[in-house]
């Protein structure tokens, strides 16, 4: 590889795997067709119901901080709705979506979609002593709810932690992966990022991470170029002895340029 901080030479075993959600561990269509419309329809009612409360003020303050401009509730709502319609990765929107979804999960109206290969992959990584983390644009609270309410049960005990826009930064920025590596206490070359988005994988590779792209069989988008690609997590989490010294990720690398 040229133009980055990662080569494709063999390296010591992976210490932690960081997974995207949308299109990687869960269905892209579930997010687009179920979760996003659910939250979009409830943005205005939520702000009305929380007018004058500490939680409501935090959302308005977050919108103001994000834009650098003071907005009243009506203007803030208009911005939130615009961001939702355009799928803008704005932290205030992601926080509010998470709060709305939390009520839906608690009421049994929502569930988090997880592909059937994900729970056994997490279990095998856990048995091998490999850390298991999630990094998504959705808020940490929304991530926990997603994995806590799946048709496979509560998967949160299989995860070691979560990162989002507020705790790590934008997913297409190499600095975000630097921050995660520092937080996890591992060198980048011993971390694996798995995602369906090329720009995110490129950023992780620039930060020295090992990378693998996912393109699910039900996903008709073009393949992600420049990264090893799998159709499920199974090839990345082979069965074997606990805490095996074998490295199934020896092929994983950064984008080839």
Image (cartoon, rainbow, N blue to C red):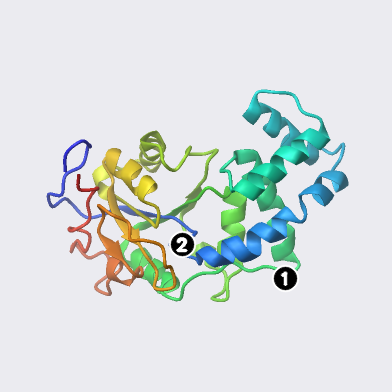
Q: Secondary structure at mark 1?
A: loop
Work out how far the residue at label 1 is from the one at label 2, CA to CA, in angstroms: 23 Å
Q: Is residue 42 left or right of residue 245?
A: right
Q: Is residue 131 left or right of residue 11?
A: right
The residue pinned by badge 1 equals: 108
User: Where does the image place residue 163, in percent across and percent down from the top left?
Assistant: 49, 46
**Residue 43 against residue 150 in the figure, above or below:** above
Closer to the observer: label 1 or label 2? 2
Residue 117: quarter of image: bottom left
User: Where does the image place residue 248, in percent across and percent down from the top left?
Assistant: 21, 64
The residue pinned by badge 2 equals: 23
Query: If you read the primary sequence from the N terminus, does the residue marked by circle 1 or circle 2 appear first?
Result: 2
- Disc 1 packing (10 Å; few <14; some 14–19; many ≥20): few
Which residue is at the front of the view, 143 or 186?
143
Which residue is at the front of the view, 36 or 157?
36
Q: Residue at the spot x=64%, y=28% of the render?
A: 67
């Amino acid at each position: 590889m040229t133009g980055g901080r990662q080569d494709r030479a063999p390296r010591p075993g992976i210490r932690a795997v960081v997974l995207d959600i949308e299109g990687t561990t869960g269905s892209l269509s579930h997010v687009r067709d179920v979760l996003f419309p659910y939250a979009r329809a409830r943005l205005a009612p939520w702000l009305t119901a929380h007018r004058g409360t500490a939680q409501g003020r935090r959302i308005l303050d977050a919108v103001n901080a994000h834009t650098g401009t003071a907005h009243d509730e009506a203007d803030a709502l208009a911005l939130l709705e615009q961001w939702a319609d355009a799928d803008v990765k704005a932290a205030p929107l992601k926080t509010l979506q998470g709060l709305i979804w939390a009520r839906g999960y608690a009421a049994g109206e929502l569930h988090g979609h997880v592909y059937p290969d994900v729970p056994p992959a997490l279990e095998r990584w856990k048995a091998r002593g490999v850390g298991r983390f999630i990094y998504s644009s959705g808020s940490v609270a929304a991530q926990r709810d997603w994995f806590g309410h799946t048709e496979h049960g509560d998967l949160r005990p299989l995860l070691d932690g979560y990162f989002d826009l507020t705790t790590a930064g934008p997913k297409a920025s190499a600095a975000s992966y630097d921050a995660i590596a520092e937080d996890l206490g591992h060198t980048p070359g011993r971390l694996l990022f798995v995602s369906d988005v090329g720009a995110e994988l490129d950023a992780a590779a620039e930060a020295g991470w090992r990378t693998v792209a996912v393109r699910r069989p039900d996903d008709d988008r073009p393949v992600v170029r420049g990264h090893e690609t799998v159709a499920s997590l199974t090839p990345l989490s082979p069965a074997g002895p606990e805490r095996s010294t074998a490295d199934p990720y020896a092929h994983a690398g950064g984008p080839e340029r």
